Amino acid sequence: MHPAPRALRRAAAAVTLALLATAVGCAPQPEEPAAGTSSAGNTCEKGKLPTRTSGRLTIATDEPAYEPWFKDDDPASGKGFESAVAYAVARHLGYGKDKVVWQTVPFNKAFAPGEKTFDFDINQVSVSDERKKAVDFSSGYYDVRQAVVALKGSKAAKAKSVADLKDVKLGAQVGTTSLDYIDDVVRPTRAPAVYGKNDQAKSALKNGQVDAVVVDLPTAFYITGAEITDATIVGQFENQGGTPEQFGLVLDKGSALTSCVSRAVDALREDGTLGRIEQQWLSDAVDAPVLK
Amino acid sequence: MTVYKEELTEGSGEHGGYVPSQRRLDRERYQRARARRATAIGALSTLVTGAVLYLVVVNAPGWPRTKETFFDWEYAREAFPKVLEGLWLNVRLLLVCGAAVLVLGMLIAVARTLRGPVFFPLRVLAAAYTDFFRGLPLIINLMIVVLGVPALRLQGVTVDPVLLGGTALTLTYSAYVAEVFRAGIESVHPSQRAAARSLGLSNRQALRYVVLPQAVRRQVPPLLNDLVSLQKDTGLVSIGGAVDAVRAADIIAGRSLNYTPYIIAGLVFVALTIPMTRFTDWVTARMDRRRAQGGVT
């Protein structure tokens, strides 16, 4: 046996051992440092919450930030429904406009396990029991309904009921309750088209690749009002199972902030702030025929 | 080792032929012992490494949640049939696009290697094609074809996202494959062509019967690479709304915020790739055997 390879092999073995040792040593990192305070520290002291960056509140949303939820793709403008809600919640928690930091987090990434980089995420996320297994939700800040949008004069635009939509080629964005409405309520005979982003669904509608798309009602009003002006809202769906579908703020599972944020949302609903913001940014999203 | 046995049975015959010396028997016994020892150490080392890795993962503080989100049996069961249904779209696209890519790629490669001033425009076109589509990111190509072409509202042009997506995939991948073919063609030594020509074969015949068969054999591994790559990229047609295996997983994951369906989709793709690799290995080995038979003169 030559001495060089043996030395080399020993070195390799030593390095492997060292690597494994570091891996084991590194592994037990504390994941939830605030776990203990979540039960005890429910005081929600203004401006002193256990946030990611002490003294600041980090709020996340996706990019692009769509109208009418945000204005001009700029969450920090305070304009648009969700931007206004986010700042109202922040103010209630004791963080002024200058203490709020915005962060871009893709819709799907916001739910990935592991440490979150934000304090809460606001991105038209519907609250559901199934989703609650993965993340924490605040109280709902908006009751949302799903609506069908089709090109004016098309066959789909003449639909008067859910049954009329059975043979229509429908499209929706993946991961949305809009898609669930297609699968669970309409149960169409043709498989729905599923898009990664609403933008692609919109262009497919324009191109005639789908007859109609399902989106939430405010988005539907924005599409027909500003983006595809030769499209029309066919109608909105009724709530399923009597409980309204609500958008909630997304927090890390077991976050110390959940109860504080929920209380802030509840308070804003009670004192009428949420109603005023809704009136200001989503006022036209009230009347659309209901599809039964 | 087999040599030793054969020799022993042969040698120990009544002809008084070769009988291995005691020294040789000792040497071989020693070598077998060393080999056994190496195997044992290798197995033990693998076992220890595996156990340590397993313990590191399982003892990670986030493991219970990771397990819940990525390895949930209920979601796996729900996702599997839907992922398979979506996979059928991937497989059909792979077969159709794969065939189209091979044909188109070969045509482009041959066009690029044609000699003579008459073919100059053809050569330039083929070069421009490969340069353009190899450089153009596939996702942009798909966007343009799947979402842009229907916007033109051309009569008689389909708006089906699967057909359009397949077209985009074929455009991009035939540019890659054309380069593989060209490299293969140019790797055949010029003496082969010269020999073929001197035997009286025409330029076309030399290409068809002498150069291409040799070239294709060398191209099998890189071609397979491109094919596997194509197989995974077929999922990108979901940009146009079609539901493939990955998008089917997406749909469940988006509703439940559980990532198990992605694991299922990933495994299904791997399961599809492995038989493909083994199959091409077998084809290559068979080609090599045939070449060895005819080649020794």
Image (cartoon, coloured by chain):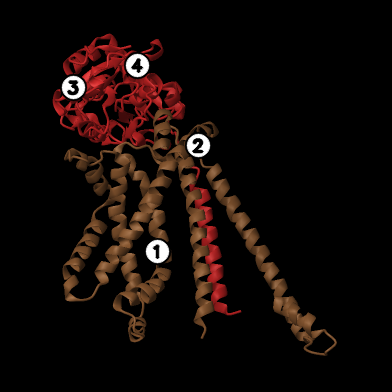
Chain colours: A red, B brown
Residue B238 placement, left or right of B115? right
Q: Are marks 1 and 4 on the same chain?
A: no
Query: The numbered mark 4 sits on a residue in which chain?
Result: A
Q: Residues within 10 Å of mark 1 (few under 14, many from 20)?
A: some
CA separation, marks 1 and 3?
52 Å
Q: Are marks 3 and 4 in contact (CB under 8 Å)?
A: no
CA separation, marks 2 and 1?
31 Å
Which residue does the image show at 38% across and 54% down from the upper left?
B98
Does dot 3 land on a helix, a strand or a loop?
loop
* Nearer the camera: disc 1 or disc 4: 4
* Nearer the camera: disc 3 or disc 2: 3
Query: The numbered mark 3 sits on a residue in which chain?
Result: A
Which residue is tagged 3?
A153
Q: In this view, does B247 lie above or below B179?
A: above
Which residue is tagged 4?
A163
Q: Are marks 3 and 2 on the same chain?
A: no
Which residue is outermost to the bottom? B16
> Which amino acid, by three-letter code, is at mark 1?
Pro
Residue B222 is marked as: 1
Look at the image and tell me whether residue B92 can be seen. Answer: yes
Residue A267 is marked as: none
Q: In this view, does A98 lie above or below B120?
A: above
Which residue is tagged 2?
B80
Query: The numbered mark 2 sits on a residue in which chain?
Result: B
Q: Residues within 10 Å of mark 4 (few under 14, many from 20)?
A: some
* Image quarter of residue A7: bottom right
Q: Are marks 2 and 1 in contact (CB under 8 Å)?
A: no
